[in-house]
Image: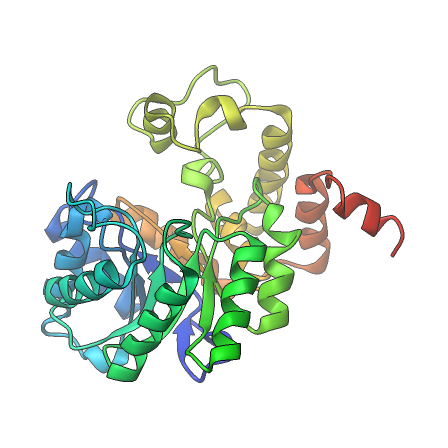
Amino acid sequence: MHYKFLGNTGLKVSELCLGCMTFGRESSKALSFQMMDMFLERGGNFFDTANVYERGTSEMVLGEWLKDKPRDEMVIATKVRFPMGDDPNNVGLSRKHILQSIEDSLNRLGLDYIDLYQVHMWDSATPLEETLRTLDTLVQSGKVRYIGASNFTAWQLQKAIDMSRYNGWESFVTLQPLYNLLDRELEWELLPLAQNEGLGTLIWSPLRGGWLSGKYTRDMQAPPSGTRVKKATEQGWSETWDVYANERTWQILDVLEAIADDLDRSVAQVALRWMMQRPGVTTPIIGVRKLSHLEDNLGATEFELSEAQMTQLNEVSEQPKPYPYSFIKDRE
């Protein structure tokens, strides 16, 4: 396992981050402990969760596992934004909700501080100044080491960075966005912004809910039972079958499978490796339900793709750019 600086900070994190969203949901506490043990044994030090994952259960499972671990050697990230109950003030990025949420997260995790505290999404109902000043207070108090954002548009992220800089407040050091071979819109604005501002990027859904794991083929008429894509289709989540079961996806999978065969690697490992070698990416967040999935994903740290293989994957997954990106590109 290699380590990278988290954006422009002096903090080093493992090249893969273990996502904890499945803990207490698809994965039992015992299985979650086994997965975290394996990740730690393989050199991983970066764990990402959120207060809303299984209504706090994910944080509690992670916190219980941390009790007999060298806490200062771990980098723990969690999030705040989405509702945790019916109370109208128990949602959003108001000062009240952030201050209550940080205390709740610290209690569930059994920690004195959180390494990376992320706002889970933009909150149009709360003045941005209120949110950013509150986050700055958390850093000054020592309860939080660094702050980050997730699921922001480019203008929202830039506005937040500029406002923090102007006021001398602690600024976002990371962005946690969606990015993978099937979803490359991040490259149009958010990734260049993150690179320009020196933000680390923590990529969620690098395998797009299993679409890039090798379990789906062009001869299928529907997702297999028990898969995340099956559940996403039933629940209306973004990984739904109707969105991705198309010729572009099958062509990408064809190339992934060919490269995987040449390297004697799995499709998932090649898809993750592509992500790990993309400019501006700090670490993909891997979310797994089984030990075998984690073992396979960790194999992405053991090899590199050649320039030719990267080019193949870049070209087959290239997305036509809408205006103004297409207009600008044609004239650069």
Position in image of residue 148 (x %, y %): 41, 66
For the point 47% across and 29% down, the residue is 216
Between 172 and 220, the one lying in front of the other is 172
Q: Is residue 251 above or below residue 62?
A: above
Residue in front for this viewpoint, 115 or 327: 327
Residue in the image at 67% along x and 59% along y: 306
Q: Residue at x 64, y 53 (%)?
A: 187
Q: Does residue 102 appear left or right of residue 2 in this picture?
A: left
Split into 4 quadrants, where in the image is the C terminus? bottom right
- Say whether residue 264 is visible: no
Query: Quadrant of residue 193 in the image?
Result: bottom right
> x%, y% of residue 114?
25, 72
Q: How many numbered discs?
A: 0
Q: Is residue 101 left or right of residue 262?
A: left
> How far across and down, in percent of the image, does residue 195 sit?
61, 68
Colouring method of the image: rainbow
Quadrant in the picture for the N terminus: bottom left
Q: Could you tell me if residue 155 is visible in this image?
A: yes
Q: Residue at x 28, y 48 (%)?
A: 82
Occupied quadrant, residue 224: top left
